[in-house]
Image (tube, rainbow, N blue to C red):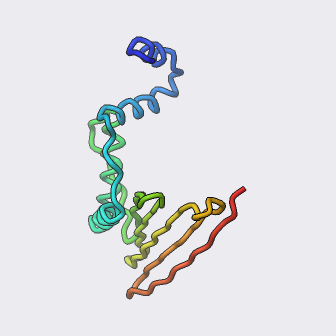
C-alpha cells in the first residue's frame, strides 16, 4: 500500500512537463470522498446561469481560474465576445451520461441535450439528441449503435 514517502518519490521523479497535471490530480484529491455528481437538473441550471451572465463574464471567469492555477495576480485584458458564446455541462442520470450545451449566436439561443447509455441487452450504445431553438422550436433524434 502506498505511503507518503513513496508518493513523494514519485512526484520527485516526474518530468517537469507532468508537474501541472500531477498538481491538478493532487488538488482534486484534497477533499476525500469526492462530492457526489451533479444531478441533471442542477447541471442544466448552472449552465443556464453561466449563459445569463453573458459571454464576457464567462471569459473573465475562465481567465481568473487560469491565472489562479498559475499564481498570476496582475489583471488581464478580457476580449469581448459580443453576441456569441456557449456554456456546457455534464452529469449522469443513473447509468446515462447527459451533456447539455447552451449556445448563443448573434443573440439567438439554442439548447442541446445529448444522452448516452448502453442498451438493455448490453450490445448497443444508445444516443439521443434534443434541440430547442428560438421561438421554442424543438426537435429530437435517437439512434442505437451495435457494439463489438
Kindly tell me whether residue 96 is visible in this rendering. yes
Judged left or right of residue 76, residue 100 is: right
Where, by quadrant of the figure, is residue 4 drawn?
A: top left
- Residue nearest the observer in this picture, 69 or 1: 1
Q: Is residue 76 above or below residue 13?
A: below
Residue drawn at (45%, 62%), measured in percent from left and top? 98
**Looking at the image, how many numbered discs can be counted on the residues?**
0
Residue drawn at (29%, 35%), measured in percent from left and top? 31
Q: Residue furthest right?
A: 148
Q: Residue furthest front?
A: 121
Residue 105: image x %, image y %? Answer: 43, 74
Q: Is residue 4 above or below residue 140?
A: above
- Residue nearest the observer in this picture, 2 or 47: 2
Residue drawn at (59%, 64%), measured in percent from left and top? 119
Residue drawn at (47%, 58%), measured in percent from left and top? 95
- Residue nearest the observer in this picture, 10 or 115: 115
Judged left or right of residue 99, residue 118 is: right
Residue 78: image x %, image y %? Answer: 33, 53
Residue 24: image x %, image y %? Answer: 40, 34
Residue 89: image x %, image y %? Answer: 40, 59
Which image quarter holds the N terminus?
Answer: top left
Which image quarter holds the C terminus?
Answer: bottom right
Kindly tell me whether residue 54 is visible in this rendering. no
Q: Is residue 68 above or below residue 133?
A: above
Amino acid at each position: 500500500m502506498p505511503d507518503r514517502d513513496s508518493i513523494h518519490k514519485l512526484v520527485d521523479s516526474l518530468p517537469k512537463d507532468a508537474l501541472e497535471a500531477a498538481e491538478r490530480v493532487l488538488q482534486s484529491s484534497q477533499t476525500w470522498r469526492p462530492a457526489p455528481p451533479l444531478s441533471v437538473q442542477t447541471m442544466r441550471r448552472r449552465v443556464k446561469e453561466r449563459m445569463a451572465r453573458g459571454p464576457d463574464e464567462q471569459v473573465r471567469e475562465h481567465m481568473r481560474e487560469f491565472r489562479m492555477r498559475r499564481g498570476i495576480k496582475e489583471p488581464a485584458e478580457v476580449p469581448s465576445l459580443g453576441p456569441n458564446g456557449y456554456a456546457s455541462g455534464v452529469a449522469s442520470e443513473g447509468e446515462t451520461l447527459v451533456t447539455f450545451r447552451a449556445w448563443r449566436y448573434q443573440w439567438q439561443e439554442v439548447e442541446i441535450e445529448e444522452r448516452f447509455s448502453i442498451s438493455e441487452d448490453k450490445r448497443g450504445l444508445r444516443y439521443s439528441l434534443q434541440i430547442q431553438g428560438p421561438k421554442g422550436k424543438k426537435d429530437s433524434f435517437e439512434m442505437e449503435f451495435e457494439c463489438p
